[in-house]
Image (cartoon, helix red, strand yellow):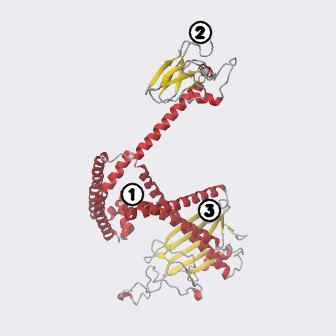
C-alpha cells in the first residue's frame, strides 16, 4: 500500500515516503600528517574517505546528527573519489514543503557541512502510475580532500515485471514472464546435457573450448536467474507505511520510509546487475552460433584459422600488454599532476585505450607539453598502432593461409551432405508444386483430365472416379483397378483409369487403360514409349486416335494423345 497523500512532483510522478539525506565523514588527523612548519596554524587535517577513516561519532549543533547503519539492504556507493559504505548520518525531508524548506535553511547553522564531510547523498523513491514504474533516485555530492564538489545524478527505473512474476498482469508482462520460463527450462535441459556429455568424455571434455564457452553461458544464466529470484523475494518483504509523514511523523515512521527507499535501491541495483550479466551473455550466445555454422565451408576455414593462430596470438598479447602498461605508466608519471585524464594509472590506461576508437585527447597533452608530449605520443603511435597492430594483421593472414591448405585435407562434413540433400528435396518439392499449380491455372484443365481418362463423360456408364482417384492419377500413383491379361481380355471399366502391375526391372508386365486391350509393358532403367492397338479407348468408333504412354522405372505412367 502507498500513502494516500504522496507528494506530486508533476502530473505524472509522485514522491513516495520521504527524502533521505545521508552524510559520510572522516576522522580528523587520520591518514594525513601536518607539516611541522604549520602545526601552530593548522590543528586538523582530513584525508580522503576510506572505511578505516570513517567517523561515526555524533556531530552538529548539540550533537543533532547521529550515525545509522545501512540495514540489511544497504549497498556501498562507488563514486569518483572513493567507494562509500552503506549507512551514515541520516536526516529526512518529508512531503511537507514548508517544514522541508525550514530544515534545509537551518542546515548551515546546524553545522551540517564542514571540512570532515566527504559525501552527501540525497535518496528518494518516485512512482509513475501511468507506466506502472518505480524510479529510484540518488543525488551524490562528493567533497574530495583537494577541495571543490563533484555532483552526479543517478535514476534507475524499474517495471513491475522485474519485481514480481507476471508483473502487473498485462499481456506484455505475461509474454515476457512466459518467455523467461521457457529460457529457464532450456537452461536446465542444457545443464543435464552437458553433465551427461562430461560423464562420457571424462577429462577430454574440457579440452574443447566450446564446452568451456557453454558452461560460461550457462553459469551466467543461472546467476541472472538467481538475482531475479532474490528481487522477487525482497520485494515481497517491502513495507511502505500508509501513514502520512507530513505532520509530526514519529521517528519510527521516518525510519520505515527510509528503509523502504533503501530496499528499492537494492532492488534497482540487482536488476541492473542482472541486465549487465545478460548483456555479456548475449555476446557469448552469438559467438556460440559459430559452433553451429562451421558446416559452411568458409566459416569452418575461418574457425580453423583462429584455432591455428591462438599460440601466436598469446605471444603477441604478451608483447602488447608490456608496451601498453609501459605507456600508461609514462602518461601517469609525466602528466598526472596536470591533467585529470592521466591523474591515476586507470585513467591513463583508459586514455590510451580510447585511441583505438579514434576518441583520443592528445591535444590537451600537447597544449601543456608541446615537445615532450608530442614525442611520447608519436612513439606510442609508431610502436603500438603501426608495428604491433600490423603484426596482428600479418598473424591472421598467415593463419588463414595455413587453414586454407589444411581445410583441403579435412574429411567432408556429413552435415553439409545432409543439408544439401534436404535443400535438393525442397527444390524438387517446389518444382512439383509449381507444375500442379500451372496445370490447374491453365484453361481446359478439366478437358485434359477427361482426355486422359480421369474425368469420364456423363453419358458413359460404369464407375466414375472420385476426387481422390483423380488426385491419385495426377500424383502419379496407381489406381486400384483390375488388369487385362496377355490374351487381350479387357480389364474392368474404370472411367478411363490406368492400372499397372508391379514387376521387377527388365521383366514383362501388362498395361490397361480403360477398355483398351492390354499391351505388354517392360520396365527398363530409362523410359520407353508404348502404343496401344488401333482401337478407340472409349468407344468402338475408329475415328478417335489411339493412346500412347510413357512408363518409367518407378512405375509412374504419363499418357498423351497422338
Point 42% across, 76% down: residue: 146
Which structural element holds mark 3? helix
Q: Marks 1 and 2: in contact by CB < 8 Å? A: no
Q: Which residue is mark 2?
A: 542
How far apart in space, not on screen, are marks 2 and 1 (Cα)?
Answer: 93 Å
Pick whichever of labels 2 and 3 is earlier in the sequence: 3
Element at badge 1? loop
Disc 2: CA contacts within 10 A as few (<14), some (14-19) or many (>=20):
few
Q: First in sequence, mark 2 or 1: give its number.
A: 1
Of 529 and 483, nearer the camera is: 483
Dot 3 alpha-carbon crowd within 10 angstroms: few under 14, some 14 to 19, many 20 or more? many
From the viewer's perspective, tell me whether residue 182 is left or right of residue 348: right
Percent of width and height locating residue 392? 29, 55
Q: Which mark is residue 359?
A: 1
Gap in angstroms between the C-alphas marked 2 and 3: 83 Å
Compared with residue 29, is residue 221 higher up or lower down, i.e. above or below?
above
Amino acid at each position: 500500500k502507498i500513502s494516500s497523500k504522496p507528494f506530486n512532483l508533476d502530473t505524472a510522478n509522485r514522491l513516495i515516503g520521504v527524502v533521505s539525506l545521508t552524510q559520510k565523514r572522516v576522522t580528523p588527523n587520520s591518514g594525513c600528517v601536518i607539516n611541522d612548519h604549520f602545526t601552530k596554524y593548522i590543528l586538523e587535517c582530513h584525508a580522503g574517505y576510506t572505511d578505516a577513516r570513517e567517523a561515526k561519532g555524533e556531530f552538529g549543533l548539540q550533537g543533532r546528527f547521529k550515525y545509522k547503519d545501512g540495514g540489511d539492504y544497504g549497498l556501498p556507493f562507488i563514486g569518483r573519489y572513493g567507494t562509500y559504505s552503506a549507512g551514515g548520518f541520516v536526516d529526512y525531508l518529508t512531503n511537507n514543503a514548508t517544514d522541508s524548506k525550514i530544515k534545509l535553511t537551518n542546515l548551515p547553522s546546524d553545522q551540517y557541512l564542514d571540512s570532515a564531510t566527504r559525501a552527501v547523498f540525497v535518496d528518494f523513491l518516485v512512482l509513475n502510475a501511468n507506466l506502472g514504474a518505480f524510479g529510484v533516485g540518488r543525488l551524490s555530492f562528493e567533497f574530495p580532500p583537494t577541495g571543490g564538489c563533484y555532483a552526479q545524478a543517478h535514476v534507475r527505473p524499474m517495471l513491475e515485471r522485474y519485481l514480481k512474476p507476471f508483473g502487473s498482469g498485462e499481456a506484455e508482462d505475461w509474454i515476457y514472464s512466459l518467455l523467461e520460463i521457457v529460457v529457464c527450462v532450456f537452461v536446465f535441459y542444457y545443464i543435464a546435457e552437458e553433465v551427461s556429455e562430461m560423464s562420457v568424455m571424462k577429462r577430454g571434455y574440457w579440452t574443447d573450448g566450446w564446452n568451456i564457452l557453454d558452461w560460461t553461458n550457462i553459469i551466467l544464466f543461472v546467476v541472472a536467474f538467481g538475482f531475479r529470484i532474490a528481487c522477487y523475494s525482497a520485494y515481497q518483504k517491502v513495507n511502505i507505511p500508509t501513514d502520512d509523514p507530513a505532520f509530526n511523523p514519529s521517528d519510527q515512521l521516518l525510519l520505515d520510509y527510509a528503509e523502504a527507499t533503501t530496499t528499492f535501491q537494492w532492488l534497482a541495483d540487482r536488476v541492473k546487475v542482472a541486465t549487465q550479466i545478460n548483456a555479456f551473455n548475449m555476446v557469448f550466445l552469438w559467438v556460440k552460433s559459430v559452433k553451429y555454422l562451421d558446416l559452411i565451408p568458409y566459416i569452418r576455414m575461418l574457425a580453423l584459422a583462429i584455432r591455428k593462430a591462438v599460440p601466436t596470438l598469446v605471444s603477441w598479447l604478451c608483447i602488447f600488454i608490456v608496451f601498453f602498461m609501459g605507456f600508461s605508466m609514462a602518461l601517469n608519471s609525466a602528466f598526472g599532476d596536470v591533467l585529470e585524464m592521466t591523474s591515476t594509472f586507470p585513467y591513463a590506461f583508459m586514455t590510451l585505450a580510447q585511441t583505438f576508437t579514434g576518441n583520443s585527447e592528445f591535444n590537451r597533452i600537447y597544449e601543456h607539453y608541446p615537445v615532450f608530449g608530442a614525442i611520447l605520443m608519436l612513439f606510442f603511435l609508431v610502436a603500438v598502432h603501426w608495428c604491433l597492430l600490423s603484426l596482428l594483421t600479418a598473424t591472421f593472414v598467415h593463419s588463414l593461409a595455413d587453414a586454407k591448405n589444411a581445410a583441403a585435407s579435412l574429411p567432408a562434413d556429413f552435415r553439409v551432405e545432409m543439408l544439401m540433400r534436404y535443400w535438393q528435396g525442397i527444390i524438387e518439392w517446389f518444382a512439383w508444386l509449381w507444375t500442379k499449380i500451372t496445370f490447374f491455372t491453365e484453361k481446359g484443365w478439366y478437358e485434359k483430365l477427361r482426355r486422359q481418362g480421369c474425368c469420364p463423360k456423363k453419358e458413359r456408364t460404369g464407375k466414375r472416379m472420385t476426387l481422390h482417384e483423380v488426385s491419385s492419377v495426377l500424383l502419379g500413383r496407381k489406381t486400384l483397378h483390375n488388369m487385362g491379361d496377355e490374351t487381350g481380355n479387357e480389364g474392368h471399366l474404370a472411367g478411363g483409369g490406368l492400372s499397372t502391375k508391379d514387376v521387377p526391372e527388365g521383366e514383362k508386365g501388362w498395361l490397361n487403360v480403360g477398355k483398351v486391350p492390354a499391351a505388354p509393358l517392360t520396365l527398363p532403367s530409362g523410359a520407353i514409349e508404348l502404343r496401344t492397338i488401333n482401337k478407340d479407348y472409349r468407344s468402338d468408333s475408329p475415328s478417335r486416335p489411339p493412346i500412347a504412354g510413357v512408363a518409367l522405372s518407378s512405375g509412374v505412367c504419363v499418357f498423351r494423345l497422338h
